[in-house]
Image: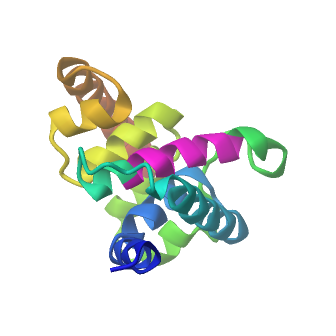
């Protein structure tokens, strides 16, 4: 199989990962589309260096998260400083019928970049070991951070639901 077809197949079957990253890091449709394209482009540029030491999904998350953070730093002038979801948010449209999920996405929008990345990987059922490998942390540090993030999200979600 040629490398381009392999890449397209992998991206197509894992595009939900990219959409989740975009949803967590940018708040409007145009920026999400731009970030999606940027992640695919950076993934393509880096694909030849993918050695298969980890799962493709883990590698894609790492490339996606790094690209999202770089994108935000570079294009900050075009985005809200807090990177919070707006009323027309993609996530709000998808989850408009479930207030609890919507409150959770709003709460996630208030987390730091690293916290968002940890949540994204955790929600994908990655093990602490895999998250640690992807994020460059120890598994114990990941466990502590996720525990703290869960508490923070509970508090933020309660506040969102009470609004």
Q: Per the image, is 67 magenta? A: yes
Q: Is residue 123 left or right of residue 93?
A: left
Horizontal and vertical percent position of residue 146: 26, 31
Residue extending furthest toward the front:
2
Horizontal and vertical percent position of residue 32: 62, 65
Horizontal and vertical percent position of residue 109: 52, 47
Picture layout, residue 38 above or below residue 25: below
Q: Nearer the viewer, residue 24 or 105?
A: 24
Q: Is residue 158 left or right of residue 127?
A: right
How many marks on residues? 0
Q: Nearer the viewer, residue 52 or 111?
A: 52
**Residue at the (43%, 55%) spot, across then down:** 105
Residue extending furthest toward the right:
77
Q: Is residue 158 left or right of residue 64?
A: left
Which quadrant would the N terminus be assigned to in this image? bottom left
**Residue at the (37%, 75%) spot, across then down:** 6
**Residue at the (25%, 18%) spot, across then down:** 141
Location of residue 97 (image quadrant):
bottom left
Task: Say whether residue 141 is visible.
Answer: yes
Q: Per the image, is 80 magenta? A: no
* Main secondary-structure element of the magenta-colored stretch: helix
Horizontal and vertical percent position of residue 114: 46, 32
Q: Nearer the viewer, residue 139 or 98?
A: 139
Q: Which residues are magenta?
A: 60-72
**Residue at the (72%, 70%) spot, across then down:** 30
Picture layout, residue 65 above or below residue 138: below
Task: Say whether residue 95 is visible.
Answer: no
Picture layout, residue 146 above or below residue 58: above
Q: How is the image coloured?
A: rainbow
């Amino acid at each position: 199989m040629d490398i381009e077809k392999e890449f397209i197949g992998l991206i197509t079957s894992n595009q939900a990962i990219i959409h989740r990253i975009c949803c967590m890091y940018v708040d409007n449709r145009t920026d999400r589309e731009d970030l999606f394209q940027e992640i695919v482009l950076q993934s393509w540029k880096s694909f030849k260096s993918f050695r298969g030491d980890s799962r493709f999904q883990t590698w894609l998350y790492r490339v996606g998260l790094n690209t999202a953070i770089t994108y935000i730093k570079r294009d900050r002038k075009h985005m809200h400083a807090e990177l919070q979801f707006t009323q027309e948010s993609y996530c709000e449209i998808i989850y408009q019928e479930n207030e609890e999920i919507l409150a959770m996405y709003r709460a996630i929008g208030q987390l730091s970049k690293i916290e968002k990345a940890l949540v994204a990987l955790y929600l994908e059922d990655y093990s602490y070991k895999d998250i640690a490998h992807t994020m460059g942390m120890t598994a114990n540090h990941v466990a502590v951070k996720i525990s703290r993030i869960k508490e923070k999200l509970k508090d933020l979600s309660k506040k969102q639901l009470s609004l």
